[in-house]
Amino acid sequence: MNRPYNPLLILLLVFTSYHPSAQAAEPKIVACMGAKVYPSPTAAPIEDAAVLIEDGKIKTVAAGVAFKLPGSTEVLDCKGKVVVAGFWNSHVHFETGWQGAQGDAADKLEAHMHEMITRWGFTTVWDLGSDPGNTLALRKRVETGEVRGRKS
């Protein structure tokens, strides 16, 4: 059955599906159908998209209904809604605990990145107030893959 959902309810559904206690023995499958999806800030939007979520993780994003849904799939009618690739935080400061980002061990920086940013769903952050030498060093290490800038 297709039901219209408020975007906040969709976010709540996605967030609660990440909690370990929300995981069922049988995979929970949710399909968000008909939304406009912006896969990245630089990519063209995908119109009338289908977003298939299994056990709290996005498995497939496709234009239209290009695949058959399992019978137990919860279908959310997302026509007229917008889905973005992740949250942006436009006010972070890489100061406390980030000094020496140029030479600190990658695993230390990754743990701090997870604690401050990625565990909350942020995929993009803007820092306009910290030491640019330090912030740019961290950015370079993330861009080269030396430091993971996302949870894997």
Image (cartoon, helix red, strand yellow):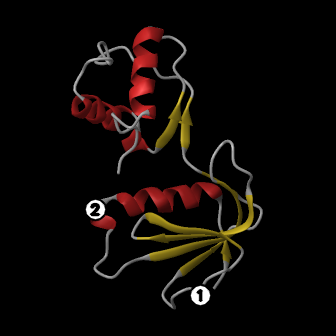
State the image coordinates of residue 141 (x, y, percent, origin top left): 38, 28
In which quarter of the view is residue 140 placed? top left
Label disc, if present, on residue 140 of the rendered structure? none
Amino acid beneath label 2: Pro
Which comes before the other along the chain, label 1 or label 2?
A: 2
Residue drawn at (54%, 47%) of the image: 86
Q: In this view, does 72 lie above or below 64?
A: below
Residue under label 1: 68
Residue drawn at (54%, 42%) of the image: 87
The front one of 21 and 68 is: 68
The front one of 116 and 2 is: 116
- Any part of residue 2 in sight: yes
State the image coordinates of residue 60 (x, y, percent, origin top left): 54, 69
The front one of 33 and 21 is: 33
Residue drawn at (37%, 14%) of the image: 95
State the image coordinates of residue 113 (x, y, percent, origin top left): 34, 33
- Any part of residue 130 in sight: no
> As drawn, is 22 to the left or to the right of 133?
left
Residue under label 2: 20
Q: In this view, does 126 lie above or below 5?
A: above
Q: Which image quadrant: the N terminus?
A: bottom right
Outermost front residue: 144
Q: Residues within 10 Å of mark 1 (few under 14, many from 20)?
A: few
> As drawn, is 145 to the left or to the right of 4?
left
Q: In this view, does 20 lie above or below 151?
A: below
Amino acid beneath label 1: Lys
Q: Is mark 1 on a helix, strand or loop?
A: loop
Whole-angstrom CA distance, mark 1 to mark 2, is 28 Å
State the image coordinates of residue 144 (x, y, percent, origin top left): 42, 33
